[in-house]
Structure formats: structure tokens, C-alpha cells
Amino acid sequence: MFLKQEEKQDSLRKHCSLQNFIKTIALQRGFKTIIEEKIKEGFVDVGLRKNKVRIAIEISDKNTKMYEVKNIKKSIKEGFIMIYMVSESDIHLKNIKELALKTIDKKHHKILYFLKPNQVADELNKVVTKEKPKTRRILGYRVQTNFEEDTSYSTLKKEDEIAKLILSSIRKKK
């Protein structure tokens, strides 16, 4: 009895930490993020919105593949334009994908994504880079902004160099 409770609590902790991980990634890319978003037929683990893009993210740890396919179907009915099924287990993800592709109408297959947690950022980057860069005026200059993630070590070096350059130019003005 005690072990079952511990397993359930451990599973819930993993689920919540994945929700928060995805929320952080999505917020960094400008998405409005709702954990346990209420929809007509229940809840979506994480709902993302940005402009006209609506993404449903379902996180699966130990639920049955039938239960997860049911969650995918309710997200389709709700009108999400992308549905991410996220699981840390390759086998569990593969089983869900096989059942989903068998039972869900083929016209919806293009909006389904079956991902490991570390792949979510890359998929969201693809969504963000599809958007046109925004042009704004800042101090009379036209500035175009576009998000492109660079995870290399050289990024840290570049940031340090930029900070030093800004500090040196400020010192020169004084």
C-alpha cells in the first residue's frame, strides 16, 4: 500500500516537473502557457497560445495508450492545430503513436507529434521561426527581431564580448 502511494506521488512529481519544464520553454518563446487548460471535455496538460497558433501538450508517464489516444482525440475536437504527446519512455511513446495512427483519421496525422521532453524546444523553435520577424522603431531606428536559439558555448563568449563592448562605449562617453 505504502509503495503504491509512493509510486503515485513520484509519477505526479515527474508529471508536474515536465509541465513546468515545458511551460518555461514555451514562455521563453513568447507563448501564453496554461497548465491543466480547461477544455470542453476535460483538461489538456499544457495549453500553448501565440497569435493564431494553439498547441495542446499531453504528458504521459504511466497512463494506458488507450487513455492517451482518447486525450489526443479530445484535443483534435477542441480545434488545436498541433498536438504534442510527450513521454520520457521511448517504448511507451512508440505504443501510443502506433495506436493513435491506427485509430485517428489520417487527415489529423500531420498535426500529431510524438516527442521526448528534450525535443519539445526544437519543435517550438520551428513554430516560432515560421513567424515573420517583427519590425519596431526604437530610438528612431528600425529594428527587426526574430528568435533563433543558439545553444553552443560560443554564445556565452559572444554575450561576454557584447557586454564588454557596451561597458567600454559607456565609459568612453563619460
Image (cartoon, rainbow, N blue to C red):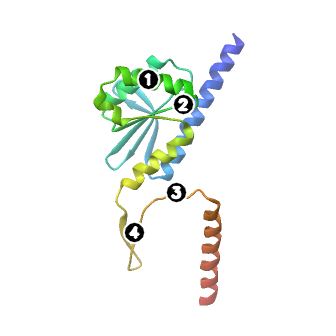
In the rendered image, the vertical position of residue 58 relative to residue 7, given as above or below: below
Q: Earlier in the sequence, mark 2 or mark 3?
A: 2
Secondary structure under the numbered disc 4 in the rendered image: strand
- Picture residue at 35% right of the left edge, 25% below the top: 74
Residue 174 visible in rendering = no
Q: Which residue is mark 4?
A: 144
Q: Which residue is mark 3?
A: 149
Q: Earlier in the sequence, mark 4 or mark 3?
A: 4
In the image, taking residue 16 as reference, residue 85 lies left or right, namely: left
In the image, taking residue 93 as reference, residue 5 lies left or right, namely: right
Secondary structure under the numbered disc 3 in the rendered image: loop
Kindly report the distance in space between the C-alpha atoms of the residues bearing marks 1 and 3: 32 Å
Q: Which residue is mark 1?
A: 98
Looking at this view, is 121 or 4 the one in front? 121
Q: Position of residue 171 (x, y in %)?
A: 64, 86
Q: Which residue is mark 2?
A: 87
Looking at this view, is 95 or 33 the one in front? 95
Kindly report the distance in space between the C-alpha atoms of the residues bearing marks 1 and 4: 43 Å
The amino acid sitting under disc 2 is Ser
Q: Are marks 4 and 3 in contact (CB under 8 Å)?
A: no
